[in-house]
Image (cartoon, rainbow, N blue to C red):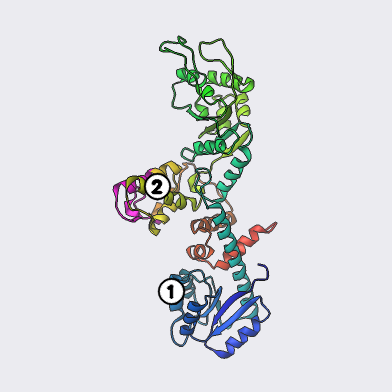
Amino acid sequence: MGDERLNVLLVEDTASLAALYQAYLQDEPLSLTVVNNGQEALEHIRRQPPDILLLDLLLPDMPGMEILQWLHREQPNITTIVITAHGSVDVAVEAMRLGAHDFINKPVEIERLKVTLHNTMKFRHLNQLVDRYRHDIEKEPFQGFIGASLPMQKVYRLIENAAPSSATVFVTGESGTGKEVCAEALHQLSNRSEGPFIALNCAAIPKELMESELFGHIKGAFTGALQDRDGAVIRANGGTLFMDEICEMDLELQSKLLRFLQSGQIQPVGSSQQIKVDVRIVCATNREPLLEVEQGRFREDLYYRLHVIPIHLPPLRERGADVISIATALVRQASREEGKSFVGLSEATKDRLQAYHWPGNVRQLQNVIRNAVVLHQGEWIEQDMLPAPLDRPLTADAASELVTDALPAPIVPLAVLERQAIERAIGHCQGNVSRAAALLEVSPSTIYRKLQSWDTPNG
């Protein structure tokens, strides 16, 4: 945190207690100002917003909860610690709902006050680092991708490191996760970016035509071959060939592809001539390639020839707040294209999209947003504008919606479930620990201690 002194405003109507707190905190790295009623507190905040507010809930001129409500609307960046002699679970929950970071019961113990303030200062510092980091990585989409989640940052680093090489890249991931976007990013960041990018979907071409589509043919090679035709490999010469759904390729053709990869030469169908080409191969599948090898549907030698640099694209349900970033960008894009006035998503819609499991990933999200924009009018996409089943409110009964595997879920340790719940809540709240704590109905300091213990070796 460096030597920066934070400005702290203490709202306490009892002069002796205010003096005691000042004495407690005189050696702390902060600048403390004291006011003794709610009106003075509001005037001071309007004039000079503090970094941290120590707020007594029982004030002579107004309830402290009114100040919290005002802060929630007008000054959400002020970190508030509530001090109350009337502490209870209900008071704590209501204070957290209104944005309080933590609370302390009277009589205040000196160590408790100092620890709470230290945790709050660390919390503010970490939030500032997160905000700065998020700003840096969200300045613009990464080569067609949108999102700043940790799984995607790993993907971005892999793409950046792999792009300058000519090594073959094997992209895996569920349907709709953006495998072709990944291939295009590899091409655009490579020294082949001025060359062609050719995409070939191995699942969309009949197997009897696949060899011709890949390597080309000469006139008369087969019925209907009325003229010479270059295949995808020739068209990609000097650039990148993206072979999507590679595991759908016929075994016989797999051997010819392996021969090309080893020699760098192709032989068009019907020709005896070998043609030298310079192509960077990126392939992709939504299957488990090693399982395909084990079951004899994919050649093992071809797998190892292609699987030089693996990149796995995470499903949308594992990307946290990226769901909202992507959906917001899609709303604005679709709104421009359809001549509508939508600018974003309502809070209820955000919650619904975040909770859904997205079996079709980004492609499904694109269709959902396009459907809502085309069929409705307004500024905000409301939940009832979404197509089924997303138009229904999320309830406890909807938990079955999140089940994507018919097999029973494995039993995992409670500590693992706790960590998953906290990380998911923080991702849902886009890094806002206070909001995450309110959703989980725990103190932000509890979350902070958990995060600190996970970052500590053997923690």
Residue nearest the observer in this picture, 105 or 242 = 242
Magenta stretch encompasses residue 391: yes
Residue nearest the observer in this picture, 111 or 242 = 242
Q: Residue 186, percent across and down?
A: 57, 37
Please give the residue where the numbered disc 1 appears in the rendered image: 69
Name the residue type under label 2: Gln
Name the residue type under label 1: Gln
* In the displayed structure image, the side of residue 175 where residue 265 appears, left or right: right
Dot in front, 1 or 2: 2
Magenta stretch encompasses residue 151: no
Q: Quadrant of residue 122?
A: bottom right
For numbered disc 1, what is the local secondary structure?
helix
Q: Are the residues tagged 1 and 2 within 8 Å (C-beta)?
A: no
Q: Quadrant of residue 109?
A: bottom right
Please give the residue where the numbered disc 2 appears in the rendered image: 333
For marks 1 and 2 on the same chain, the one whose residue lies earlier in the sequence: 1
* In the displayed structure image, the side of residue 193 where residue 351 appears, left or right: left
Determine if residue 359 is in view.
no
Location of the C terminus (image quadrant):
bottom right
* In the displayed structure image, the side of residue 217 where residue 392 appears, left or right: left
Q: Residue 42, percent across and down?
A: 47, 80
Q: Residues within 10 Å of mark 1 (few under 14, many from 20)?
A: some
Identified at 48% across, 21% down, the residue is: 213
Total number of numbered discs in the rendering:
2
Q: Residue 436, percent across and down?
A: 51, 62
Q: Which mark is residue 253?
A: none
Magenta segment boundaries in residue numbering: 367-395
Q: Residue 129, percent across and down?
A: 60, 61
Check the image and report above or below for 269 versus 288: above
Identified at 47% across, 17% down, the residue is: 229
* In the displayed structure image, the side of residue 246 where residue 330 appears, left or right: left
